[in-house]
């Protein structure tokens, strides 16, 4: 994994929303869960931007609570996915494509057990099933935590 954080700013397709993260990770995670794939049409490539996120263009932002653990935001004007926001720790995970930054590295794949067979990344990554990810993220060994991501 890449070490360090970066201060970066990204925007949606129409430029109506601007996201600035002062402590964004240089590592990208690919999420293969069914919700992310439906939201983006494929794996969602995410940057952990932590809690220190500034968002401009609030009039353009539409929110959708897709599970018990967080909500997704998109631009109501152009449809660009803007972020996934966890309720418990306040972290924002922003699609890597919003940022014009070439210093990222794909280091992790989550919900690998839900990845369809029709695509494959060539990067060597740390791979976690949905259950493994939930155990690491929530410290729980229960299907109820995993189900919270789906309801």
Image (cartoon, helix red, strand yellow):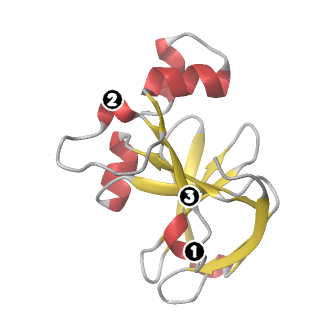
Name the residue tied to disc 3. Answer: 105
Distance between the alpha carbons at the discs numbered 1 and 3? 9 Å
Q: Residues within 10 Å of mark 1 (few under 14, many from 20)?
A: few
Q: Which quadrant holds the C terminus?
A: top left
User: How crowded is the residue under tag 3: few (<14 C-alpha within 10 Å), some, or many (20+)?
Assistant: some
Residue 141 — which label? none
Residue that mark 2 sits on: 113
Of residues 21 and 69, the one drawn nearer to the viewer in this rendering: 21
Direction from residue 133 to residue 117 in the image, left or right: left
Q: Looking at the image, which residue is at 65% across and 23% down?
A: 138
Asked if disc 1 and disc 3 are in contact, CB closer than 8 Å, the reply is: no
Is 18 displayed left or right of 43 in the figure?
A: right
Figure check: 118 above or below 33: below
Q: Earlier in the sequence, mark 2 or mark 1?
A: 1
Q: Nearer the viewer, residue 39 or 31?
A: 31
Category of crowding for the residue at label 2, using alpha-carbon neighbours closer than 10 angstroms: few (below 14), some (14–19), many (at least 20): some
Q: Residue furthest top?
A: 141
* 39 lies left or right of 96: left
As drawn, the label of residue 102 is 1
Image coordinates of residue 88 in percent, x first then y, are 73, 36
Task: Please determine whether, in this image, residue 73 is positioned above or below residue 119.
Answer: below
Q: Earlier in the sequence, mark 2 or mark 3?
A: 3
Judged by depth in the image, the label closer to the viewer, 2 or 3, is: 3
Q: Is residue 54 visible?
A: no
* Kind of element beneath mark 1: loop
Q: Who's the residue at 56% across and 89% down the image?
A: 15
The residue at 56%/58% (across/down) is 105
Left or right relative to 146: residue 83:
right
Q: Residue 100: x, y in percent?
A: 58, 80
Tag 2 secondary structure: helix
């Amino acid at each position: 994994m890449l070490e360090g954080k970066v201060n970066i700013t990204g925007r949606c397709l129409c430029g109506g929303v601007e996201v600035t993260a002062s402590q964004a990770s240089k590592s990208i995670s690919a999420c293969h869960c069914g919700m992310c794939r439906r939201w983006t049409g494929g794996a969602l490539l995410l940057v952990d931007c932590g809690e220190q996120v500034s968002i401009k263009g609030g009039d353009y932002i539409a929110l959708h609570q897709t599970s018990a653990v967080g909500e997704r935001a998109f631009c109501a004007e152009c449809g660009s996915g803007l972020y996934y926001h966890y309720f418990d720790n306040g972290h924002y995970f922003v699609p890597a494509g919003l940022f014009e930054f070439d210093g990222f590295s794909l280091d992790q794949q989550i919900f690998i057990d839900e990845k369809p067979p029709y695509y494959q990344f060539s990067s060597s990554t740390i791979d976690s099933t949905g259950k493994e990810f939930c155990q690491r993220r929530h410290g729980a060994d229960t299907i109820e935590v995993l189900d919270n991501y789906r309801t």
